[in-house]
Each structure stands twice: as C-alpha cells, then as structure tokens.
Amino acid sequence: MSVVTVQLGQCGNQVGLELFDTLYNDAQAGQRKTYATASCGRFFHQTEHGEHVARAVLIDMEPKVIKQNFSKTAKSGKWKYDNASGFNQRQGTGNNWANGFCIQGPRHREAVEDILRREVERCDRLHGFLALMSVAGGTGSGVGTHVTQCLRDVYPKSFIVNHLIWPYRTGEVIVQNYNSVLTLGHLYQLSDGLLVHENDTAHRICSQLLHIKDISIADINKVIAHQLGTVLQPALTADSNGVYSTNPLGIDWQLRPLAVSERTRSLTGSNVNTSLANLLILRGKDVFSAETGIFDDAALYSSWLSPKDAFKIWKCPVSFNKYEKTATLVSNSQALIEPLDNMVRKAWSMFAARAYIHQYTKFGISEEDFLESFTFTEQIISSYSQLGCNV
C-alpha cells in the first residue's frame, strides 16, 4: 500500500527532502530484503531503469526550494523526484494565511489536482496522503490547508495525515499565531491525524543531545526527518511461522486526532501527562525483551480508558538507519496543551487589538472565520485539559 507525500511551502519541501533521504538510506542499509522491498514500495516507485523516484508532490508559491530539491536529488545518484511532480508559481503568499487559502490555493487548484492525480495513478494501491507543512507561514499553512481540503474532496475514503511544524515560541513570523489558529481550526475538521513537531524541541535535541554548536535549519530538519521516519517506516512483525507483515501508517489515527512525537513529561509523581493513546515503536536489537511495563500504569491514561486499549507497541528486529536500537513514542496526550494555549492567548491579544486583521479580511477571511477557528482550538485545549479528570 502506497503513501503519497505532499510537500508544502519552503518548510514542507525542506523537511520532505530530508525525510525521503532518511527513508531511502534506512531501506538500503543492508536490511532484510522483505523490509527493503516493502519500505521502498511504499514511498518510492521504480522506473524501468531501476531508479527510485519519490512518491511525492512538491508545491510552493516560489520556485527556489523546489528547484534546489530537484538538483540535490539528481546529483545524489540515490533517489530522485519526478520533475513533473513539482508545482511552483512566482506568486508568493508572503506570510499571509488568507492569501494562501483564499487566493493562491483556489487559483491553482486544477493544476495541483492534476499533479496529485498523476502521482496517485502510479500507486497499485493507495493507502493515503502525508502532507508536510508549517503552521506559521503563508504557503505551507494557507495553501496547505486548501490542498488538504482538495484531498478530502477528491479522495474522501483515503487517509490524510498532516505533519505540522510548530514555530519557535520566540517568533518566526509576526502573524504566526493567527496562521496557526486558522490552520488548526480547519485541519482538525479535515485530517485523520495531526502529527506535530515543535521547532523548540528539535532545537534542544540538536543542542543537548547532538551537541551541535551552531544549529542550522538543516540540522533541525534532519532531526525532524529522523523522528518522523521511525514512525512512517513499516513496522515488521513476525508470526509463529516467521512470516513478516507490514503495517503502513498503522497508527489508529481516528483515535489519535492530535499526536506529538518525542515529547513527554515525567511518568512519575503528580505531574503526569495524561494520554488518550500511546504508540511505542521499538526497533533493532533486543526489542522482544525490552521492558515496557511502565506504560501499563493506569495513571497515565484518562480514567475511562484501560491501558490495554490505550497502549500499543510495535516491535521490529530490523534496526533503523544503522542505529543498534531506537525507541519512538507517539502520544495523543496533554503534551500540547501548553504550546496550544500559548499560541491562542497571543493570537487573542492581537485580535482584540485589531492588529493585522485587515491583512486577512482583504483576501476574504472574515472576523467570523477567526472566531470559528478560535472556538475550535479552544475546544481542543478544553477537551485535552479534562483528560486527567475523573468522569
């Protein structure tokens, strides 16, 4: 079953390049043939000359990053993008969500749908779409939300998972909180799953774990791609006869509408990060003897859930990307309450002061649209805040 990746905006295209590189390197790292075949077949198709071509559509309102991606992969000699899978126009959205969602997205909808359809037709069996996008800027968030709406309209039965890059709290774009509220308010109704990576968390990993002194965007993207790759690669499980099967995007996204990778609080004491569901992915040596009993603690989950229903584990003896052992936790939990609340609070303050509202209304977003998105995001915060309450 194949997954078509949609790379949106500068951020989505840069992360997408690193992600496919990670997936390809992992599949080719001396792994078992069954694993390599399943992995490559899911994210790449092969030409008659044996070249691996990413199952991807690249979309941006500026040509620079897409051209760089094409050039880098062509020179690498490992895998490449199909030059016909890129869409770019010299019609930038700036950092305005409304311009991307209301103007540029609809203007180019037919062309984008044609490229998507062509990529889908290359799949023997389509499982779904993975959309990579930032929530802060204009193209990734605005056009990305519109493209997600297109995917939902054209492929209503396919899974759609949106991978969202959360901006630095110190600020990247002055209207990033507006853009984030509007993005989440719409995607929560369209997507089967939202998988979030925070730039601040990835930055700390670069600094504290990888000991990188001068941290670049490329370093951040490599960390995000590595973590995302461990979630996306097929988890191989062996039955009693030693036959391996694969589980593509096997998270039950309908039970996990908002998930965050690699972010947890203390599992002991009073500061418990209450969860709706946890997925633990163990790869490599000694996975079948790993002790995971801590996740059976009922205190980790909402009172109306049993750990048996809320906790799933994948164990795969094949190592990931030459690492002897890896462990990744994908958690649908209260971990995002704080950054969500911080984002909504700042957006409300700007909205109350009427700051930059005209930059959105001139492109067709009304104040009622803002209020509706505020309502959705505040409902998310409220629902997750109540997870730890007794019902």
Image: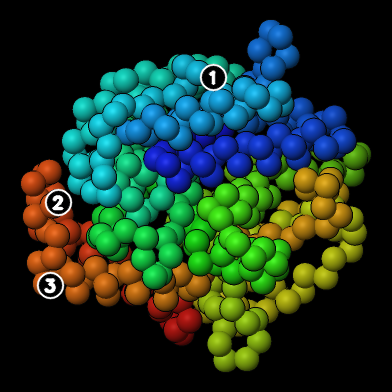
Question: Residue shown at 60%/62% (left/top)?
Answer: 214
Residue lying at the far front of the rendered structure: 214
Q: Nearer the viewer, residue 317 or 57?
A: 57
Q: From the viewer's perspective, is residue 350 above or below residue 280?
A: below
Of the image marks 1 and 3, the number of the one nearer the N terminus: 1
Question: Residue shown at 62%/50% (left/top)?
Answer: 222
Of the image marks 1 and 2, the number of the one nearer the N terminus: 1
Residue at image mark 1 = 82
Residue at image mark 2 = 360
Going by the numbered disc 3, the residue's amino acid type is: Ala
Q: Position of residue 164 (x, y in %)?
A: 45, 52
Disc 1, disc 3: CB below 8 Å?
Answer: no
Disc 3 element: helix
Q: Nearer the viewer, residue 87 or 155?
A: 87
Q: From the viewer's perspective, is residue 122 above or below residue 314?
A: above
The label on residue 352 is 3
Is residue 213 visible in this depiction of the protein? yes
Q: Position of residue 72 (x, y in %)?
A: 60, 30
Going by the numbered disc 2, the residue's amino acid type is: Tyr
Q: Position of residue 31 (x, y in %)?
A: 85, 37
Left or right? Give the position of 122 relative to 358.
Answer: right
